[in-house]
Image (cartoon, rainbow, N blue to C red):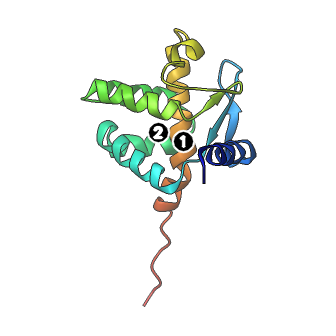
Amino acid sequence: MNDSTNETQAFNAEQHTDVGNRGQLKDGRDYYVPIWSARVAFENLIQAGKLLGQDSLVRVCLEEKQDVAMTAGMIMAAEDHALTVALVENFVSSMRVDGTKVAPNTIDKIFGENLYAITEAFCIVLKSQYTAFFTAALDVEPSPAK
């Protein structure tokens, strides 16, 4: 295939894929988080678990009420700040806010000085990608009686 065919297919796939999580940020803006491929989700899960702590990551994904506060605590507790910032940028860059794709070079424009909004966005991406996984993984059926 030539480059223009690849670009057209990528464009069409992006326009016609509705697999993802939609909602509103606390500030009222709409967001959309597409679901990652299994390979990308797995790679990001491993990195997030190493940087942010496996237990903290699972708790944030399963928490329903204080999830953004827990996310902020998890970020602040990370030992490697530079890698953690890169991880947050990478995750948040997978979403759209009010129809605009977030990118590392647009994060400041989209979120401004609102630290809560970027933390909320990171939390939303985490939960969009991993809540179903952790819920299924922890929903262990009892072994049959012998």
Q: According to the image, label 1 marks what residue?
A: 127
Three-letter amino acid code at the position of disc 1 = Lys
Name the residue: 52% across, 30% down.
92
Q: Is residue 91 above or below residue 38?
A: above
Q: Position of residue 89 (x, y in %)?
A: 45, 27
Cα–Cα gap, marks 2 and 1: 8 Å
Residue 14 can be seen in this image: yes
In the picture, measured across the screen, residue 104 lies left or right of residue 33, that is left
Crowd class of label 2 (few under 14; some 14 to 19; many from 20; radius 10 Å): many
State the residue lying farthest toward the bottom.
Answer: 146
In the picture, measured across the screen, residue 105 lies left or right of residue 84, that is right
State the residue lying farthest toward the right.
Answer: 16
Q: Are marks 2 and 1 in contact (CB under 8 Å)?
A: yes
Three-letter amino acid code at the position of disc 2 = Val
Give the secondary structure at mark 1.
Answer: helix
Residue 67 can be seen in this image: no
* The one of 119 and 73 positioned closer to us in this rendering: 119
Q: According to the image, label 2 marks what residue?
A: 60
Name the residue: 64% across, 30% down.
96
**Earlier sequence position, callout 2 versus callout 1:** 2
Name the residue: 50% across, 72% down.
141
Give the secondary structure at mark 2.
Answer: helix
In the picture, measured across the screen, residue 82 lies left or right of residue 129, that is left
- Where residue 67 is drawn, which disc sits there? none
Q: Quadrant of the C terminus?
A: bottom left
Location of residue 98 by image quarter: top right
Q: Is residue 42 above or below residue 72?
A: below
Q: Position of residue 128 (x, y in %)?
A: 57, 43
Q: Position of residue 57 (x, y in %)?
A: 41, 42
Name the residue: 59% across, 16% down.
110
Q: Is residue 71 above or below residue 9?
A: above
